Structures are given as structure tokens and as C-alpha cells.
Image (cartoon, rainbow, N blue to C red):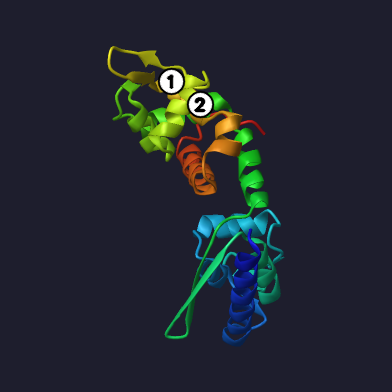
């Protein structure tokens, strides 16, 4: 991060911290924490249960979590970027997940067998052709077609060459998308989090049919 970007982030964090302390009591709930960080409830819960953000677990079915505002501020200080906007005294800021969060989600994905992940992708993208163009694979992998072509040329993705284009069989596309290279380095952190949440939701719905490593 450039010095100017760091200075801007620090200034934004100071402004946000002051407004958070004014707006909220010493401790906030899960819902308040989710709104502050602008994240899904499932992701917010994971941040707390995993210990990434310290919190008091009351053990209650409702109002289970109590999160110190200072710990929320500490978490925001670790993210890569904070874009703060104030509208009618309501704080609205977006965050990009830090590297430690990517590693945490990646490690959890690794506990699920690759075959199960591929089965999930097959069901999710059943309406795609059995042999996809680089553009079609780029759409589901949230990458640029040129990036897909780069990995085809390097042999990381197996493709069948026709007279006019490269076609990638679904199985080979999905094998690349569940690979350590793709999850840890190639795809975006947003893809990792979305894939993790969707995969676990699918596993919950198909618990009797899927075997997950403990």
C-alpha cells in the first residue's frame, strides 16, 4: 500500500472509530457488528466463532454475542481498505478482507474433499455446456478470459483445441477451480468467501449424501 493510501486509510479509520464510539455503547450485538462491517450474517458469525474478532459468547439462543466496539475497530484496522461514507449520520463503509481471513476460509475449504467440491460445482453450473469456451469458464471463475487462456497455455487447465477455439471440458475446469493454486492465489477473496458459504450451505442441505472430512 502506498504512503498516501495508508495515510488516507488511517484518517478514515480515526473518523470511523470516533463515530462508532459515539453511536454505539461499549458492546454491540451480532446484527450491529454485521451492519458495521457490511458483511453477511454467516460471515459475521464465522468471524466471531473462529476468534478472528474477539467476542463474549453468552450461550443464549438470542443475543448470543457481545462484541466490544474496540475489538470491532481493531478488526477494521487490519483490513486492506476502508471506504467511508456518511449519509444522515449513518456509517456506511466497505471492507476488503485481510489475508488472514483468506487463509482461514481456504483452510476450511481444504477439509472438504475435492470430489465433493466438484459435485457442488457440477450442480451449480449444470446449465453450462459440457465443453466450455474460455469466456464461459471465465464467467463462472470470475476471471478474465485472458487469464483462463494463460493457464490453458501453461498446461494448468486441460483444453481441447478445435479449428477455431479452445474448449474446456467441465471436469477439467472444475478440477482447476478446486485446486490449491486457484483457491489460494488465482481467485479473489470475495470468490473464496462466497464459494465457502455456498458450499457449506449446499453441504447442509445434502448432509446425508455428502461425506466431509473431520
Q: In what quadrant of the picture does the N terminus appear?
A: bottom right
Disc 2/disc 1 C-alpha distance (Å): 9 Å
Local packing at callout 1 (Cα closer than 10 Å; few below 14, some 14-19, many 20+) is some
Residue at 60% in and 80% down: 15
Q: In the rendered view, would you say 166 is above or below 7?
A: above
In the displayed structure image, the side of residue 193 where residue 159 appears, left or right:
left
Q: Where is residue 127 in the image (x, y as percent from the top left)?
A: 29, 30
Quadrant housing the C terminus: top right
- Residue drawn at the location 47% of the way across and 85% of the way down: 89
Q: Mark 2 highlights which residue?
A: 176
Q: Which residue is drawn at 43% across and 38% down?
A: 143
Find residue 87 and report its image quarter: bottom left
Read off the residue under disc 1: 171
Q: Where residue 185 sits in the image (x, y, percent)?
A: 59, 38
Which of these two is toward me, 98 or 213? 98
Q: How crowded is mark 2: few (under 14 residues within 10 Å), some or many (20 or more)?
A: some
Q: Can residue 209 be seen in this view?
A: no
Q: Is mark 1 on a helix, strand or loop?
A: helix
Mark 2: which secondary structure? helix
Amino acid at each position: 500500500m502506498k504512503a498516501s493510501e495508508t495515510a488516507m486509510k488511517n484518517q478514515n479509520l480515526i473518523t470511523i472509530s470516533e463515530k462508532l464510539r459515539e453511536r454505539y455503547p461499549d458492546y454491540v450485538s451480532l446484527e450491529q457488528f454485521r451492519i458495521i462491517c457490511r458483511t453477511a450474517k454467516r460471515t459475521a458469525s464465522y468471524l466471531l466463532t473462529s476468534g478472528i474478532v474477539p467476542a463474549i459468547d453468552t450461550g443464549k439462543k438470542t443475543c448470543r454475542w457481545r462484541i466490544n466496539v474496540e475489538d470491532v475497530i481493531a478488526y477494521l484496522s487490519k483490513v486492506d481498505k476502508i471506504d467511508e461514507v456518511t449519509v444522515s449520520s449513518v456509517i456506511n463503509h466497505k471492507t476488503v478482507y485481510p489475508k488472514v481471513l483468506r487463509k482461514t476460509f481456504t483452510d476450511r475449504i481444504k477439509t472438504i474433499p475435492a470430489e465433493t467440491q466438484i459435485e457442488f460445482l457440477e450442480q451449480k453450473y449444470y446449465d453450462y455446456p459440457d465443453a466450455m469456451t474460455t469466456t464461459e469458464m471465465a464467467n463462472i471463475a470470475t476471471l478474465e478470459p485472458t487469464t483462463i487462456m494463460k493457464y490453458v497455455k501453461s498446461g494448468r487447465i486441460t483444453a481441447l483445441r478445435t479449428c477455431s477455439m479452445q474448449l474446456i471440458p467441465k471436469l477439467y475446469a472444475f478440477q482447476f477451480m478446486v485446486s490449491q493454486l486457484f483457491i489460494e492465489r488465482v481467485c479473489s477473496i470475495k470468490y473464496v468467501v462466497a464459494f465457502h458459504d455456498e458450499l457449506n450451505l449446499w453441504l447442509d442441505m445434502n448432509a446425508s449424501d455428502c461425506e466431509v472430512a473431520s
